[in-house]
Image (spheres, grey):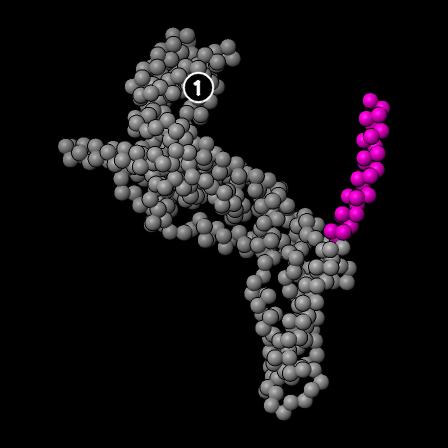
Amino acid sequence: MQAGAGLLFTAQQLLLPMIEGLVHSRRELFAWVQQVGISALNQLFELDAVELAGAKGKHSSTRSHYRWGAAQIALPFGGRQIVVPCPRVRGVDGGEAHLRSVAQFRASDPVPARVLNQVLLGVSTRGYGKSLEPLPAEIVARGASKSAASRHLIARMTDKLREQLRHRLDDLDLLVRMVDGIEVAHRTVVVALGILADGRKVVLGLWLGSTENAVLCTALLNDLLERGLKVEGRILCVIDGGRGIRKALGDVFGDLAVVQRCMVHKRRNILEHLPPHRKAYVTRMLSAAWNSETAQLARRRLRTLLHWLEHNGENGAAASLREGMEETLTVAKLGLPASLRTFLVTTNAIENLIGSARRTSRNVTRWRSGQMIVRWTGLGLIHAEQNFRRVRGYRNLPLLKRALRAESLKLDLAEEAA
């Protein structure tokens, strides 16, 4: 034991100087790269000045510009603004000329994007300046304060939200829609996620309100229609069972909304009414029913469980099972393969999406407005969307499309008969 401890101590004594040397070398290398970059900037500025006014100290009778000293300017560099000297050039007819390279650097300002990326990695706006690589002492820097980082972040987030969450939906071949809500700062943001016919997931939109009620959900769904969302037949809608969402789907889409209740939420709601010694049995019975090969068999098993609950006085659990029971079997009625059916009977996809939004905003300690809530929630959704993969069993989605078309045909025939 003592020999092992001595060996560990010896290894530490050998490795610590090596680690310190690596850290020091990294700092020195980065400082050198910074110096080279700033030197290159100065050379670019001088080349632009020579192009306009000629070489310094050389007379030219045909010159159109002349040098006029130098000035300190701010340029984006390393996630912040640095102040560097820049030659000034004026035209012979008066008026200052702007150097081409200065305009190019300012037009391609990477600072807002850098702020956004740092925040997505978990850095707060207050800690943004400390997260950047240190600059040499002789370089004057600014634009890395909390207020500056917040301004860059707001500008970048606003642009991204406008681009990603307000885009037209005319060209989407949508088969599945999931709707759920997230509570942020005592407000509710309702989020809509779509599954396309090729298996891709896409964030459709979000809407802010006070609670997850039918009015808020209806506003979101109407917004999707105004942005061109096509509803040419029946569409599968997977929800957690919230009454506001269910009512909004009926009000906006009527019979075109084929609703699937999330089995995870339904199981959780039923178990909340049961004592501990009965939860395991009911869980097994629910799993056996929902994993049945056909909807008819699943229905018989659920009714058997319903009678058992009523016979044993578990009226609360029985009422929870009875409410929306048929909508837990919607996907089973469509006759889909098990791989796709397992994905479509829960709201796990949109729950994971909402979890990403929560993680993105975890460093926010003070919510100042509803617009701030929308910005941060939308940022989390957009960030999650960049890592989306196709849904499990996406190769079987044509079967879902045919099944929904068949349901639409039944609806049309029923309307004609009526």
Which corner quadrant of the image does residue 91 belong to?
bottom right
Q: Badge 1, how many Cα within 10 Å: few under 14, some, many 20+? A: many
Provide the residue span drawn in magenta.
1-27
Residue at point 58%, 73% (across, down): 100
Name the amino acid type tagged 1: Ile
Tell whether 87 sits left or right of 11.
left
**Residue farthest along the top direction in this orientation:** 311
Q: Residue furthest bottom?
A: 61
Residue 139, image x, y percentages? 74, 62
Name the one closer to the observer, 332 or 27.
27
178 w.r.t. 162: above or below: above
Q: Quadrant of residue 409?
A: top left
| Viewer-proximal residue among 50 and 192 | 50
Q: Residue at x 45, y 16 (%)?
A: 283
Residue 416 percent across, percent down from the top left: 15, 35
Say above or below: 281 vs 56: above
- Is residue 215 something one can see in this rendering? no
Does the magenta segment cover residue 49?
no
Residue holding disc 1: 270
Q: Nearer the viewer, residue 279 or 108?
A: 108
Q: Residue 330, percent across and down? A: 32, 27
- The quadrant of the image that shows the N terminus is top right
Predominant secondary structure, magenta span: helix
Residue at image position (44%, 26%) is: 265
Q: Secondary structure at mark 1?
A: helix
| Relative image position of residue 50 (x, y in whole percent) | 64, 79
Quarter of the image that includes the C terminus? top left
For the point 18% across and 32% down, the residue is 414
